[in-house]
Amino acid sequence: MDNEKFRAASKAAENWLGVLSLLAQNCAKPQLLDENYRILERLQDSYYAHLDVLREAKEPLAAASDSPVEWGSTARYVWSSAHEAAANVLCLALEWLFWPLADIDDPEQQRKAARKLIEDAVALKMTGEQVAKLQERIRRERAKLLRGATEPHGNGAQPPETKSKMSLDAQALAVFIEHSDWSKVQIAKHLRCNPKSLAPGRCPKLASAIAAYKAKPKMPRGTKDADGNFEAWDDE
């Protein structure tokens, strides 16, 4: 397990709970519809960025958990750790409120559907005490896993340090360098993020690289005669 990636994913999961609680409180306010969906878009990006790490840590987290986590008014959902609970509550939010809009092309119909869907966010509502308890459990699980990961090995040596998590901009740039013929949609699919997350404002390095690539002048073509002279011309 990459300690730094896990730490980042764990802190993200802790944050998801607070954001979802706030979203549920604001779902009944029509004037906040656009802001609520901007929040959901950012949550989706964060979810895809950290999902693989949390899945990899599922069994160690279950072992570190105080007890299973029950969620829902009738305890319909039971998860093995607070981390798994946070990830699955966010997944439910995206399934109920956000992903259905991807099948609607007409902007007006999409907005109409969004106004209806956001009403279901009330099902995500948690009390401040519930959120605080889950966040505290996440912190305890994180501490247990990281403490166990840094205990000396049998020979007394510490495990090697891991590199810090690359930003999305840096990851996207690395993919573009390797696949300069790919579109942003293809890069986003490879990185499992929303294409809008690769906008110039969020990924300036990627935007600069794409602009430079498109502006790169083409080499002229031409012919060489029997005397070795070249005649070149530019493509129209």
Image: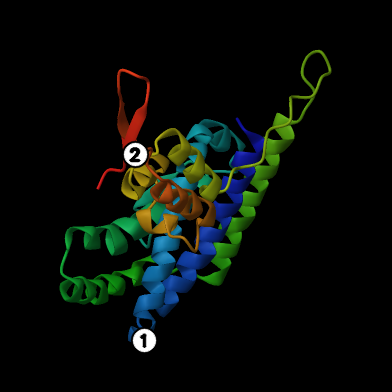
Could you tell me if residue 92 is visible in this image? yes
User: CA separation, marks 1 and 2?
Assistant: 41 Å
Callout 2 secondary element: loop
Question: Residue 131's quadrant in the figure?
Answer: bottom right
Could you tell me if residue 27 is visible in this image? no
Q: Residue at left 50%, top 39%?
A: 174
- Name the spot of residue 11 as percent of width and height, x first: 61, 52
- Residue at the front extreme of this rendering: 227
User: Which amino acid does the dot numbered 1 rest on?
Assistant: Gln
Q: Nearer the viewer, residue 27 or 205?
A: 205
Q: Nearer the viewer, residue 61 or 95?
A: 95
- Name the spot of residue 49 as percent of width and height, x first: 48, 46
State yes or no: discs 1 and 2 in contact (Cβ < 8 Å). no
Question: Residue 164's quadrant in the figure?
Answer: top right
Q: Nearer the viewer, residue 82 or 191?
A: 191
Q: Residue at left 54%, top 36%?
A: 62
The residue carrying pointer 1 sits among few (fewer than 14), some (14 to 19) or many (20 or more) residues within 10 Å by Cα, namely: few
Q: Earlier in the sequence, mark 1 or mark 2?
A: 1
Q: Is residue 175 above or below residue 203?
A: above
User: Which amino acid does the dot numbered 2 rest on?
Assistant: Asp
- Name the spot of residue 96 as percent of width and height, x first: 28, 61
Q: Residue at left 18%, top 58%?
A: 103
Residue position for label 2: 181
Q: Is residue 133 above or below residue 121?
A: above
Relative to 14, is 197 on the left or the right?
Answer: left
- Name the spot of residue 94 as percent of width and height, x first: 34, 58
Q: Residue at left 30%, top 64%?
A: 97
Callout 1 secondary element: helix
Residue position for label 1: 31
The residue carrying pointer 2 sits among few (fewer than 14), some (14 to 19) or many (20 or more) residues within 10 Å by Cα, namely: few
- Residue at the top extreme of this rendering: 155
- Location of the N terminus by quadrant is top right
